[in-house]
Each structure stands twice: as C-alpha cells, then as structure tokens.
Amino acid sequence: MTLEEIYYVGQTIAVVALLISILFVGYQIRQNTKALKATSHHAITDSFNQINALIISDPKVARLWRLGMAGSADLSEDETTSFGLLALAYMRVFETLYYQHGNGTMERKLFEAELNTLKWAVTNTGIRAWWSANPISLSAEYRDFINGLIAEAIAGRAEEIK
C-alpha cells in the first residue's frame, strides 16, 4: 500500500467518524429537547397545582374563587382584591404556557389540552370582568390572544341563543 492510498483510507475513516459524531450530536440535541419540553410542562402543571392546592386547602379561598369566577357582588373590597391577584396568578401561568407553545418548548397536544381550561376560564363572568379592568403585567400579544378567545366565546353564546 502506497503512502497516497494510506492517506485516502485515513481521510475516509475521518469522514465516517465525523458523520457518526454529527449523528450523535443530533441525537443528543433531540433528547435534550424532549427533556426540556417535559420539564417545561411539569413546571406549568406544578404552577396550576399550587393554585389549585391553595383553593382546595382553605374554604375561604375556595369561596373567594367560586364567587369571584361568577362575578358575584357578594365579595368585599378586600376579597375582590384577593380574587384579582389570584386571577392574575392564574393568567400568568397561562401566559407562560402560551409563550412556551409559541417558542416550541411546549408540546402542541399539551397546549391544546390546557387551552380548553383557558377557554373555560375566560368565559366566566368574573374573569372577563377582571380582565377588562386589569390590563397589567401581561404581554400585548397574550392580551390579544385572550381577547380573541373571549370574542369567540361571546360569538358562540350568541349562536346558541339564535
């Protein structure tokens, strides 16, 4: 075997090794992306669970949430403030979910499942009243998205009445 042939064999081995390395890096990136998406979804679920745990652990908070969602006038001024902050926390979790879906770190099917809950939330009188009175702490893009969901809900109710 000549020196030139040895050189070409070495080059071929180097190209094969490089291709294997690239495939391995691609595999590692794919695994990392899956782990990131799972962690992202877990964090969202944990945030919702913390709010739910707060509501179910204290009858006063459960009453506050129930009456607030219904848009009840039976809430005191302090309770209305508390409901507003609870609603803000709830909507911030949804905003995070919306953001993560938009940048691809949330699985579409998981976003769509949570979207059903969000649609339910924005059809409640109390959330809609709070939403229109509190344009704070949420991005313009997310506010537009929620306003679209509210408009769809209102249009859907109008169709049911016809």
Image (cartoon, rainbow, N blue to C red):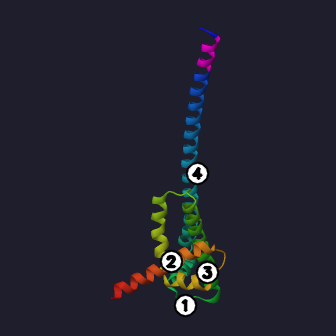
Q: Are the residues at dot 3 and dot 1 in contact (C-beta closer than 8 Å)?
A: no
Residue sitting farthest toward the right: 137
Q: Main secondary structure of the magenta part?
A: helix
Q: Nearer the viewer, residue 25 or 7?
A: 7
- Mark 2 or mark 4, which is nearer the start of the sequence? 4
What segment carries the magenta color? Answer: 3-10
Comparing labels 4 and 2, the label whose residue is closer to the camera = 2
Residue depicted at x 59% and y 27%: 15
Q: Amino acid at mark 3?
A: Gly
Q: Which residue is mark 3?
A: 84
**Amino acid found under the numbered disc labelled 4:** Leu
Most foreground residue, 23 or 70: 23
Label 1 to label 2, Cα distance in Å?
A: 29 Å
- Marks 3/2: CA distance? 21 Å
Seen in the picture, residue 102 relative to 8 is either above or below; the reply is below
The location of residue 87, given as percent across then percent down, is 58, 77
Visible residue check, residue 62: no
Q: Where in the figure is residue 17, as x and y percent of width and height?
A: 59, 27
- Which residue is most to the left? 162
Q: Quadrant of residue 156?
A: bottom left
| Quadrant containing the N terminus in the rendered view | top right
Callout count: 4
The relative height of residue 78 versus residue 29 in the rendered view (above or below) is below
**Label 4: how many Cα within 10 Å (few below 14, some 14–19, many 20+):** some
Picture disc at residue 36: 4
What amino acid does circle 2 point to? Answer: Gly
Q: Quadrant of the C terminus?
A: bottom left
Image height of 58 relative to 101, above or below: below
Whether the residues at callouts 4 and 2 have beta carbons within 8 Å, the answer is no
- Element at label 4: helix
The answer to whether residue 6 is above or below residue 39 is above
